Amino acid sequence: MTVSGPNARGVFITFEGGEGTGKSTQVRLLVERLNALGLQASATREPGGSEGAERIRGLLLDPDHPRFGATAEALLFYAARADHLATLIRPALARGEWIVCDRFSDSTRAYQGALGRLPAATVATLEGLVVGDSGPDLTILLDLPAEIGLARAAARRGAAAGDGFEREPSAFHAALRKAYLDIAAAEPARFAVIDAQGDVDAVAAAVFAAVRSRLHQRLAVSA
Ligand code: Z5A
């Protein structure tokens, strides 16, 4: 089922949070649940999600290259986002579909803005230019003490080399958690903050409860 009538634009949900907080896992589970309800929903991710953006992802997350500075990173993330929006997100929303995205603009606000010290006004200018009125209807912030997320990500990675973000010290990841909570507190109508310490099923239940509570009119189902 797609969305029709006065709410012809689809629904855009983003997941945010630090490393290893379970975003990819929960994006997949939410899309499966929406599809099971008969809704046309797809998962995507940033950086990436479209062919051009995936190429830029390769530059940004190259384990053999140190991190670019915050300005270069913001421009690259926004170049990728422009392609992702133009080729995948906006067309899907125009068809009335649901898009569930693993990271989006709030990642740039947190990583390049708050942590990279790029002025908030600069990040806001890029966001206005590229995203405009195509921002998310709901953003789920998966909140977890940094050390738990880092341990989960390290266990999954095994012996593989981490990228430049994963090699940041633990103080970086703790500051990132606070930055995300500050961003969410400034926009409580858009954000749902979920405690991600529970097991996968418990977190998935909390995520769906937030979707149902915030988007019940768009869901139009009794789940
Ligand atoms: N970045 C940026 O700086 N600016 C931007 O604008 C954007 C991004 C868009 C992308 O990294 C990097 O780019 C990211 C920010 C930066 N840097 N970092 N760090 P990525 O896409 O490669 O990785 P990530 O976004 O950080 O996600 P992740 O590390 O892959 O983690 P995750 O998606 O949140 O978690 P997961 O893969 O679902 O789960 C991790 C492991 O934990 C896995 O083994 C799961 O099975 C397990 N897991 C999941 N949930 C649970 C629960 N509930 N309990 C126990 N174990 C669990």
Image: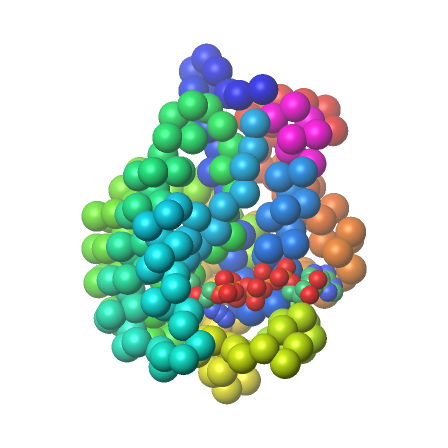
| Residue 145 visible within the image | no
Q: Nearer the viewer, residue 17 or 188?
A: 17
Q: In terms of depth relative to the viewer, which is nearer, 60 or 105?
A: 60
Taking 202 as reference, is 149 above or below it?
below
Q: Nearer the viewer, residue 39 or 87?
A: 87
Residue range of the region highlighted in magenta in the rendering: 33-39
Q: Where residue 55 sits: x, y (%)? A: 35, 57
Is residue 162 left or right of 143 when viewed as pictured?
left
Name the residue at 68% across, 45% down.
29
Figure check: 181 above or below 6: below
The quarter of the image that holds ligand 1 is: bottom right
Q: Is residue 63 left or right of residue 21?
A: left
Identify whether 163 is placed above or below 181.
below
Answer left or right for 178 relative to 223: left
- In the depicted view, which residue is nearer to us: 55 or 150? 55
Can residue 29 be seen by looking at this rendering? Answer: yes
Image coords of residue 207 (percent x, y): 66, 47
Horizontally, is 27 left or right of 117 in the view? right
Residue 147 vertical position relative to residue 134 in the rendered view, above or below: below
In the image, what residue occupies the spot 49% across and 82% down? 167
Image coordinates for residue 73, horizontal then vertical, percent: 30, 68
In which quadrant of the rendered image does the N terminus lie? Answer: top right
